[in-house]
Image (tube, rainbow, N blue to C red):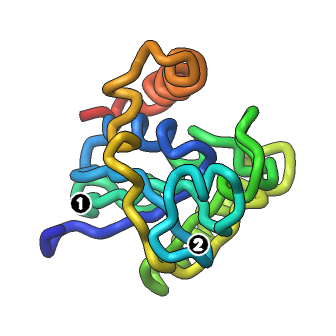
Amino acid sequence: MNARTEVALLGGGCFWCLEAVFLEVRGVTHVESGYTGGTVAAPTYAQVRAGDTGHAEVVRLEFDPAIISYHDLLEMFFTIHDPTTLNRQGNDVGTQYRSVIYFQSAEQEKVAHKVIAEMANVWDAPIVTELSPAQPYFKAEEEHQRYFERHPLQSYCACVVAAKLEKFYAMHANRLK
């Protein structure tokens, strides 16, 4: 990370989906899948997936705020997952798939509250996205980094991740790299 970048930490279901989308966003300089919000130090994918650690699958984004604002990143986040389903995104069920924003500063918290209020006017059901201060973050195993890019024909990727990417491309073509 350099002096011009900031960090966003977001969970909205399987991290493979979020990672694939944010890798395409102009101004996002680095995307990494990982875990945060739980009680186990250095959790593994198997532990988090089982739902026993309290962690959420998240993406850690480094972005250049001169190119894309935190506000705009959060707006995108709310268009690529369902923030109205508690601990669930499609067939992915459990607290590890919760909708959550881990803010890095008081300013990020303020912006997140603002975007959540704006999104409440867009969605037909109440927003259940958790808003929490950043907690210890653990990078996911290497096999989970750039997963869609390396496994586009894997069934989950071909059906779920690809659909999210298509929706994103249609809604945010002006934000692509």
Q: Quadrant of the N terminus?
A: bottom left
Quarter location, residue 156: top right
Task: Say above or below: 91 vs 63.
Answer: above
The residue at the far left in this view is 2
**Above-or-below relation of 38 to 20:** below
Q: Residue furthest right?
A: 125
Neighbours of disc 2 within 10 Å: few (<14), some (14-19), many (20+): many
In the image, which is nearer the foreground, mark 2 or mark 1?
2
Relative horizontal placement of residue 82, taking residue 27 as reference (left or right): right
27, 92: nearer the viewer: 92
Measuring from the top left, give residue 129's x and y in whole percent: 70, 61
Residue at screen point 48% across, 18% down: 154
Who is closer to the viewer here, 71 or 155?
155
Quadrant location of residue 172? top left
Vertical arrangement, residue 22 with respect to residue 115, above or below: above
Name the secondary structure under disc 2.
Answer: loop
Task: Give amino acid for label 1.
Answer: Asp
Residue 104 drawn above or below residue 10? below
Task: Please give the residue where the numbered disc 2 appears in the rendered image.
Answer: 37
Residue at the disc numbered 1: 64
Residue 165 in the image, given as x and y percentages of width and height: 47, 26
Q: Inspect this view and state whether residue 22 appears.
A: no
Q: Residue shown at 56%/21% (left/top)?
A: 163
> In the shown orientation, is residue 19 left or right of residue 52?
left
Whether residue 170 sits left or right of residue 63 in the image: it is right
Local crowd at mark 1 within 10 Å, few (<14), some, or many (≥20)? many
